Every structure is written in C-alpha cells, then in structure tokens.
Amino acid sequence: MKAADVIKAYKNGERNFQRLNLRGANFKEQDLSGADFSYCQLQSANFSQANLTNTKFIGVKAGLQKRWLILFLLVVLVLIIISSLFSALLGSIVSLIFESNLENKVSGWTGLITIIIFFIISFRKNLGGGVIF
C-alpha cells in the first residue's frame, strides 16, 4: 500500500493500518492522529511535521534502509580520514616549535598562530558548530 492510499483511507475513517509495508512513504504534514501502524515496515518513512497524537507504533520496523546506512557510514569514514589527516598536519606543525633550528621554530609558531586565528574567526562567524568548546 502506498502513502497516498493510506492517507485516502484515513480520510475515509480507516484507522487500522497494521502489518503494512510502508517503506519510504511520505506522510509529511499529514494528520494521522489515532492511527494504528503496529507491526508495519517503516524504513525511511517521512513523518516530519505530521500530527501523530495517539498514534500506535507497536513493534514497527523503522530506521534507515541498508543502502542509506552504508552510504552514511562511508561518509563518516571519509570524514574520519580527513579529520585524522588534519590532526596529523596540526601535530607536525606544532612539533616544529620544539625544534632547535630557528627557522623551524618560526614556521611552527606561524602555523600555530594561523590555525588559532582561523578557529577564532570561524567561531565568531558561527562556523564552529562542530567544534566543541
């Protein structure tokens, strides 16, 4: 059954939608108060801004479909790799401060000050949403 069929049946007075496969259904901004979606498959279903007052979701199978889960995990892996590379770069720049060579010390301090200025500007421009302070 498709989302449009469920919405039409709901408007005709039906409230029992148990054990339906509603994967990827879009119920955005719909009034589904009092409906019973028990034991339905609701992976990737969109209930954003829907009225779900007294709606039953007993034993539903919800969450992301596996292809979306894999995609999100790959994106997280890429972000972890990028973060690790930047951490290694920052560590190597800061380690230059402790070198005995004056040129390396100047380069290390310059890099560290540049990074600090970048974080200050990012924080003031509200670009630091992911930075924890």
Image (spheres, rainbow, N blue to C red):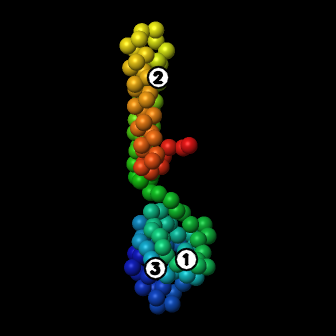
Kind of residue indicated by mark 1: Leu
Q: CA distance from mark 1 to mark 2?
A: 54 Å
- Quadrant in the picture for residue 38: bottom right
* Residue pictured at 56% horizontal, 43% vertical: 133
Q: Secondary structure at mark 3?
A: loop
- Relative to 46, does residue 108 appear above or below in the rendering? above
Residue ID for mark 3 = 30
The residue that mark 2 highlights is 94
The amino acid pointed to by label 2 is Val
**Label 2 to label 3: alpha-carbon separation:** 55 Å
Considering the image in quadrants, where does the N terminus appear? bottom left
Specify which label sits upstream in the sequence, 1 or 3.
3
Whichever of labels 2 and 3 marks the residue nearer the N terminus, that label is: 3
Relative depth, front residue between 129 and 97? 97
Up/down of 84 relative to 11, above or below: above
Q: Is residue 124 above or below residue 45?
A: above
Q: Position of residue 50 (x, y in %)?
A: 49, 76
Q: Which residue is mark 1?
A: 52
